[in-house]
Image (cartoon, rainbow, N blue to C red):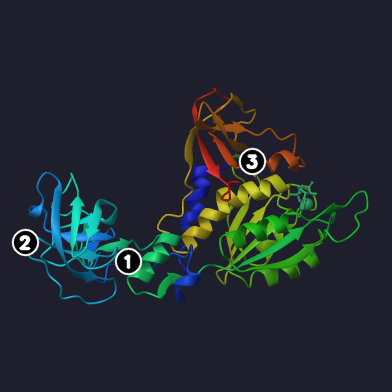
């Protein structure tokens, strides 16, 4: 059986970006840039004053003080020709260009205006004080954001700063979701004692939307080859079809057989992981990808996080897509009773003023109340049966932490 590393290798090898499009930066959060974003002019574009105060010549100061003649005022957003000579100062605003003849700015708090003169106190006066010189943040042409990375809020602000209101990004895949199982009913229905309300499609829809993907829920399919076959055919019209349930070894677990029948090539089935061992992954003849996830709701959320999210990131143009684990100390000893790689829910907690990870014990797949308390997943490597308190572990946060 494939290890998690081997399975992820196969999953990531199958993922290649699916085209590009141009979108407004307002809509571009988390989309991956096709091109580097460059500084279109030096940043700052001129010697920019960083404080409201007086632009001065530092050489005019003796023992940190000077009395200077006020020769004018420079506001932001206006072109000023005002220059100063020895013994002179000009009142100036934060964000205005500093005149070439001044080499420092003394903040207004250190100034006392006395008619046409100003008394300045600045014990630390030196050239460059309170002036951000042209190009000191970035020279023209410098790469400010690298291609192949998702746009962040600060990245969008950079795009706006360099005049890009639209950017070229990789297209994100759309998702189709099917819940399977003859016992599964819509949450709006009154369940019989042997029926279970569908929650998996909500997990899959929510996690997909959190990645800013278009999701279509195709409905709940009973464990009937005819019904499921038709739903799969429809599902394969999207970029990625995600099924929950019906991939294990049971008599009515029809999904692997049906997918083969519909021409979906199997890339992997079964991974040495807990939860999620029966995970199925493949690609249809028309290029749609299919994930079959075991129906246990804890497995669905875990497998989406561990296997589906990195695939979607890579398909969306991310340079690696791989899961970014945090490394944090355990707040208590952790025991694993499985020989498979274990992904166990964990919670961030504070001990001695430091962030730790606390294992969240769930009694079983139905123990949502405890599972819901988790902030992410603790990775317990293959064959590891015990991790001691304060040892560092890999932690994969769900995303929205609190
Ligand atoms: P399966 O993978 O089909 O064998 O399902 C494993 C377990 O998950 C069974 O107890 C199912 O009833 C349950 N299950 C399957 N699909 C869903 C769903 N959509 N919502 C909630 N529970 C489910
Ligand atoms: Mg089932």
Q: CA distance from mark 1 to mark 3?
A: 37 Å
Tag 2, which secondary structure? loop
| Residue 121 x, y percent position in the rendering | 20, 49
**Residue depth check, mark 1 versus mark 2: number of the one nearer the observer:** 2
Q: Tell me: 96 left or right of 69.
A: right
In this orientation, does residue 197 appear? Answer: yes
The image quarter containing residue 142 is bottom left
Q: Which mark is residue 36?
A: 1
Residue 209 versus residue 335: which sits nearer the camera? 209
Q: Tell me: 224 left or right of 159.
A: right
Q: Earlier in the sequence, mark 1 or mark 2?
A: 1
Q: Is residue 65 above or below residue 361?
A: below
Q: Which mark is residue 374?
A: 3
Q: CA distance from mark 1 to mark 2?
A: 46 Å
Q: CA distance from mark 2 to mark 3?
A: 66 Å
The image quarter containing residue 335 is top right
Q: Earlier in the sequence, mark 2 or mark 3?
A: 2
Q: Circles 1 and 2: CB distance less than 8 Å?
A: no
Residue 91 versus residue 320: which sits nearer the camera? 91
Q: Quadrant where the N terminus lies?
A: top right
Tag 1, which secondary structure? loop
| Residue 301 x, y percent position in the rendering | 65, 49
Q: Is residue 71 above or below residue 111?
A: below
| Residue 341 x, y percent position in the rendering | 57, 36
Q: Which residue is found at the position 51% from the left and 26% from the top?
A: 352
> Residue at label 2?
86
């Amino acid at each position: 059986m494939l290890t998690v590393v081997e399975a992820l290798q196969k999953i990531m090898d199958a993922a290649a970006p699916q085209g590009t499009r141009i979108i407004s930066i307002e809509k571009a959060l988390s989309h991956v840039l096709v091109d580097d974003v460059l500084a279109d002019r030096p940043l700052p574009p001129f010697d920019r004053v960083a404080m409201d105060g007086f632009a001065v010549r530092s050489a005019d100061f003796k023992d940190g003080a000077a009395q200077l003649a006020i020769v004018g005022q420079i506001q932001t957003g206006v072109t000023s020709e005002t220059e100063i000579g020895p013994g002179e100062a000009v009142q100036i605003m934060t964000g205005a260009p500093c005149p070439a003849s001044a080499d420092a700015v003394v903040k207004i708090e250190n100034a006392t205006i006395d008619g046409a003169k100003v008394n300045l106190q600045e014990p630390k006066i030196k050239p460059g004080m309170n002036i951000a010189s042209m190009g000191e943040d970035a020279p023209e042409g410098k790469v400010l954001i690298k291609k192949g990375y998702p746009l962040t809020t600060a990245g969008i602000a950079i795009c706006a700063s360099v005049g890009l209101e639209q950017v070229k990004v990789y297209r994100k895949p759309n998702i189709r979701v099917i819940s399977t199982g003859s016992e599964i009913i819509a949450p709006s229905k009154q369940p019989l004692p042997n029926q279970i309300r569908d929650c998996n499609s909500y997990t899959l829809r929510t996690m997909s939307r959190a990645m800013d993907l278009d999701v279509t829920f195709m409905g709940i399919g009973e464990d009937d080859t005819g019904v499921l076959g038709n739903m799969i055919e429809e599902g394969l019209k999207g970029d990625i079809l995600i099924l929950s349930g019906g991939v294990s070894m049971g008599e009515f677990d029809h999904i692997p057989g049906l997918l083969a029948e519909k021409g979906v090539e199997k890339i992997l089935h079964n991974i040495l992981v807990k939860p999620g061992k029966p995970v199925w992954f493949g690609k249809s003849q028309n290029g749609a990808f299919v994930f079959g996830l075991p129906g246990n709701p804890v497995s669905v959320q875990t497998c989406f996080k561990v296997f589906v999210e990195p695939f979607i990131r890579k398909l969306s143009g991310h340079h690696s897509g791989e899961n970014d684990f945090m490394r944090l100390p355990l707040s208590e000893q952790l025991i694993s009773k499985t020989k498979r790689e274990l992904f166990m829910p964990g919670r961030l907690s504070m001990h001695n003023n430091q962030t730790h990870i606390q294992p969240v014990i769930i009694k079983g797949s139905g123990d949502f109340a405890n599972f819901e308390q988790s902030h992410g997943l603790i990775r317990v490597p293959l064959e590891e049966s015990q991790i001691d308190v304060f040892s560092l572990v890999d932690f994969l946060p769900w995303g929205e932490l609190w």
